[in-house]
Amino acid sequence: MTRVVLVDDQTMVRAGIAVILESEGMQVVGEAASGADAVRVARRERPDVVCMDVRMPGGDGITATRELAGAGVEDPVPVLVVSTFDLDDYVFGALEAGASGFLLKDAEPEVLVDAVRRVAAGEGLVDQTLTRRVIDEFARRRGPVAPEASAAGLLTPREKEIVDLLCRGSSNAEIAAALYLEPSTVKSHLSRIMTKSGARDRVQLVVWAFGHGIAVPGA
């Protein structure tokens, strides 16, 4: 059973998400109305996923995400940002802070359920309607980074091709079609790439690739 902590300053929002998730067999093991409380509850409950709002009084979601899932956190907790905000500093701040996914609050219930399951499974997710826009804007804001030989040397030529397509917003099926591979082969490659890079999921692999110059903005 997938265990979830809900973080939002609006009680009705938390209640609505809880109904959706619990109707699909998931268990809400904790709730919080601020980033500071989110960190305490998540560290106590160790859920499979934290559904995190961004703007809240008493501690924002980005700071909480960094404390739960940021670089250097020894035992990170996967965070799915569920926000009303589209392309703004909150989204990119959350990704850089270590979020495993981002979803708009107006997403359909089945999309929310799928997102929670995917983040719990270590796949990571960005709202399909925003994927390419998010990646393009994220890359633009980061700017060009000189490739790091040590990072580039971790990957085989095929793995570099897969990372490049991933950073363009391609799905596993699209990567497979472009490289004439089976989707299962792409999934296996991505699993090995994440092990090599230390990335926990697809979203953080994109962050790693841009941050180390493996992917080039606008390429």
Image: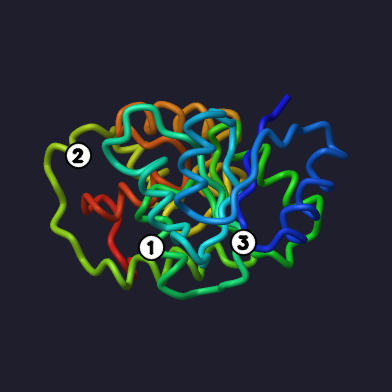
The quarter of the picture where residue 194 lies is top left
Q: Which of marks 3 and 1 is nearer the N terminus?
A: 3
Q: Distance between the residues labelled 2 and 1?
A: 23 Å
Q: How crowded is mark 1: few (under 14 residues within 10 Å), some or many (20 or more)?
A: some
Marker disc for residue 93: 1
User: Which one is in front, 217 or 16?
Assistant: 16
Q: Residues within 10 Å of mark 2 (few under 14, many from 20)?
A: some
Q: Distance between the residues labelled 3 and 1?
A: 19 Å
Q: Which quadrant, please, contains the C terminus?
A: bottom left
Closer to us: mark 2 or mark 3? 3
- Amino acid residing under circle 3: Asp
Q: What element carries label 3?
A: loop
Q: Which of marks 2 and 1 is nearer the N terminus?
A: 1
Q: Residue 92 at what x, y percent from top left?
A: 41, 64
Count how many numbered circles sit on residues in the image: 3
Name the residue rendered at 31%, 72% in the picture.
Answer: 141
Q: Which quadrant, please, contains the N terminus?
A: top right
Q: Residue 212 at what x, y percent from top left?
A: 22, 50
Name the residue rendered at 56%, 42% in the picture.
Answer: 176
Closer to us: mark 3 or mark 1? 3
Residue with the mark numbered 3: 9
Residue with the mark numbered 2: 151
Q: Is mark 2 on a helix, strand or loop?
A: helix
- Amino acid residing under circle 1: Gly
Q: Residue 85 at what x, y percent from top left?
A: 56, 72
User: Which one is in front, 203 or 31?
Assistant: 31
Name the residue rendered at 37%, 37% in the picture.
Answer: 199
Name the residue rendered at 28%, 61% in the picture.
Answer: 216
Q: Earlier in the sequence, mark 2 or mark 3?
A: 3
Q: Is mark 1 on a helix, strand or loop?
A: helix
- Amino acid residing under circle 2: Ala
